Amino acid sequence: MYQALKAFHFPSSNLAKILFCFIVPALTYAAVAQDRGQYPNQPVKIIAPFAPGGPTDGIARKLANGLTLVTGKTFVVENKPGAQAILGTVFVKDAKPDGYTLLLNETTGVFAINPAITNPPPFDSNKDFTPISLIASGPIFLLVNSALPVKNLNELIELSKKNPGGLSYGSAGGMGQFPTHVSPELFKMKYGFVARNIPYRGAGLALIDLAAGRVDFAMSTGLVAAQPFLDSGKVRAIAVTGKQRLANMPTVPTFLELGYPLPELDEGVMFALFGPANLPPDIVEYLSTATVKAFHTSEMSEGLKTLGLSTAKNPGPKPHGQMMKTEITTWTPIAKKMNLTE
């Protein structure tokens, strides 16, 4: 390079300046590339914005273990619960975009519904985060107390109309929680269903009261927490979201086949991995690729089954980003129209 530039007969001082302009950026890029090539060289924190023991926490821990297995690096879970997942989500929003602070979160409720019903919104879902990969999803079941005199969804609807305000459902997590609060309210809005919300601090508590008959029904993802009550016969599943019945629950019809389509809920509950805004593309690629590899470990594939969930069919930053846009576009007007204050 030096000889080539010297052939143009630059004064030595100018030649030094030109070389400086070429060499320093190149060295800087090489140093950054080398540093990125070693990523991660310290533990990566995956923030779970809910308390330990719930589905988000469980997915985060299975993902962290899976990533540790396939990369040989250290991924750990840190719980930051509070304000319907807002505290932990904002913590990641404000974190340095270096790949060492990530977020495992449910997407529809946190990024589409909560900002639509909170004034002012706690964050800009489109601008404050970097999509990394979809992780897991699960259908939403409508569960009823077995003592309720109904055998199917039509009979539940008829019973609700005969007893305005008499039926109740258990929800978890407060106003706008998805799916236990939003799903019943969506069904009420679209099909004239009548029921009142009984809020609980967690889905487990709501299911206990459902089995005891203190509430009449609930809508919840996965069946792990409900399985003991299903096995004992105290609770029955009478409908499930999606376009077709589930292989592991073939006797439970879909809302669609029963004549009550809920296309907004077809994808069920989706969980995904995020970083702060401006996360470097090479780090996104590293994490996305490692996530797909983690899907093939028993830690992830079998572990998610124990939660009643499955790995994402289309992982990666692009499908994740598109899904985010779709959910925000779909749910923002619905959330503003629904009465989510009770």
Image: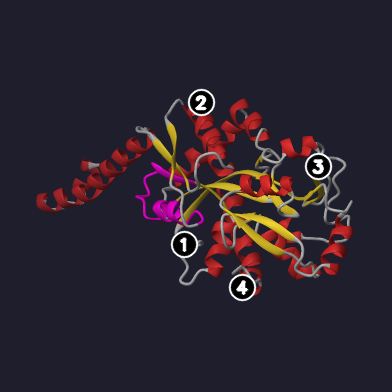
The secondary structure type at the circle numbered 3 is: loop
Q: Nearer the viewer, residue 33 or 195?
A: 195
The residues bearing labels 3 and 4 have C-alpha atoms spaced at a distance of: 32 Å
> In the image, what residue type sits under mark 1?
Lys
> In the image, what residue type sits under mark 3?
Leu
Q: How is the image coloured?
A: secondary structure
The residues bearing labels 4 and 1 have C-alpha atoms spaced at a distance of: 21 Å
Q: Earlier in the sequence, mark 2 or mark 4?
A: 2
Q: Nearer the viewer, residue 282 or 129?
A: 129
Residue 173 lies, with reference to residue 311, above or below; the image says below
Q: Which residues are magenta?
A: 84-103
Residue 79's quadrant in the figure? top left
> In the image, what residue type sits under mark 4?
Lys
**Residue depth check, mark 2 versus mark 4: number of the one nearer the observer:** 4
Q: Position of residue 216 (x, y in %)?
A: 76, 55
| Image disc number at residue 246 | 3
Q: Quadrant of the C terminus?
A: bottom right
Residue 53's quadrant in the figure? top right
